[in-house]
Image: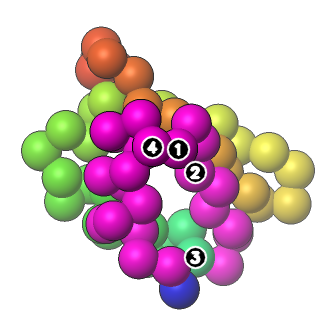
Amino acid sequence: MADYANELERLKNGEIDKLDIPKEEFLEFRKILTGREDFKHFRGTAFHHGKTQYEYTEEPSK
Protein backbone atom coordinates (compact mmCIF):
# COMPACT_ATOMS: atom_id res chain seq x y z
CA MET A 1 0.00 0.00 0.00
CA ALA A 2 1.20 3.51 -0.82
CA ASP A 3 2.11 6.08 1.84
CA TYR A 4 -1.26 7.80 1.64
CA ALA A 5 -0.54 10.27 4.44
CA ASN A 6 2.33 11.62 2.35
CA GLU A 7 0.27 11.48 -0.86
CA LEU A 8 -2.53 13.50 0.76
CA GLU A 9 0.00 16.16 1.79
CA ARG A 10 1.34 16.27 -1.77
CA LEU A 11 -2.22 16.66 -3.07
CA LYS A 12 -2.95 19.46 -0.59
CA ASN A 13 0.30 21.27 -1.49
CA GLY A 14 -0.45 21.11 -5.21
CA GLU A 15 2.45 18.79 -6.03
CA ILE A 16 -0.05 16.40 -7.63
CA ASP A 17 -3.49 17.17 -9.10
CA LYS A 18 -5.32 13.92 -8.33
CA LEU A 19 -4.89 10.82 -6.23
CA ASP A 20 -6.24 7.47 -7.45
CA ILE A 21 -7.26 4.90 -4.84
CA PRO A 22 -7.88 1.31 -5.93
CA LYS A 23 -10.87 -0.55 -4.53
CA GLU A 24 -8.66 -2.95 -2.56
CA GLU A 25 -7.03 -0.11 -0.58
CA PHE A 26 -10.03 2.15 -0.07
CA LEU A 27 -10.93 1.18 3.50
CA GLU A 28 -7.38 1.63 4.78
CA PHE A 29 -7.06 4.89 2.85
CA ARG A 30 -10.34 6.16 4.32
CA LYS A 31 -9.01 5.67 7.87
CA ILE A 32 -6.04 7.88 7.04
CA LEU A 33 -8.19 10.47 5.27
CA THR A 34 -10.83 10.83 7.99
CA GLY A 35 -8.12 11.09 10.65
CA ARG A 36 -7.05 14.43 9.16
CA GLU A 37 -8.48 17.71 10.45
CA ASP A 38 -8.87 18.96 6.86
CA PHE A 39 -10.52 15.83 5.48
CA LYS A 40 -13.54 17.79 4.22
CA HIS A 41 -11.28 19.55 1.71
CA PHE A 42 -10.71 16.29 -0.17
CA ARG A 43 -13.37 15.46 -2.75
CA GLY A 44 -13.64 11.93 -4.04
CA THR A 45 -15.20 10.79 -7.29
CA ALA A 46 -16.07 7.11 -7.75
CA PHE A 47 -15.47 5.36 -11.05
CA HIS A 48 -16.19 1.93 -12.48
CA HIS A 49 -14.55 -1.12 -10.89
CA GLY A 50 -14.22 0.58 -7.51
CA LYS A 51 -11.55 3.16 -8.30
CA THR A 52 -11.91 6.47 -6.47
CA GLN A 53 -10.10 9.64 -7.45
CA TYR A 54 -9.49 12.45 -4.95
CA GLU A 55 -8.86 16.15 -5.48
CA TYR A 56 -8.12 18.90 -2.97
CA THR A 57 -10.55 21.82 -2.76
CA GLU A 58 -10.05 25.19 -1.11
CA GLU A 59 -13.60 25.15 0.28
CA PRO A 60 -14.56 22.25 2.57
CA SER A 61 -17.58 20.14 1.71
CA LYS A 62 -20.67 20.57 3.85
Point out the image quarter for the C terminus: top left
What amino acid type is highlighted by mark number 4? Answer: Glu
Which amino acid does the dot numbered 1 rest on? Ile
Q: Which residue is mark 3?
A: 25
Mark nearest the camera among 1 and 3 is: 1
**Of helix, strand and loop, which one carries label 2?**
strand
In front: label 3 or label 4: 4
Nearer to the camera, 11 or 43: 11
- The residue positioned 80% from the left and 45% from the top of the image is 47
Residues at marks 4 and 1, CA–CA distance in whole angstroms: 4 Å
Q: Secondary structure at mark 3?
A: helix
Tell me how far mark 2 sits from mark 3, CA to CA.
12 Å
Q: Which residue is mark 2?
A: 19
Q: Which image quadrant for residue 32?
A: bottom left
Label 2 vs label 3, nearer the camera: 2
On the image, numbered disc 1 is attached to which residue? 16
Regarding residue 44, the answer to whether it shows in the image is no
Q: Residue furthest front?
A: 15
Q: Residues within 10 Å of mark 4 (few under 14, many from 20)?
A: few
The label shown at residue 48 is none
Q: Are marks 4 and 1 in contact (CB under 8 Å)?
A: yes
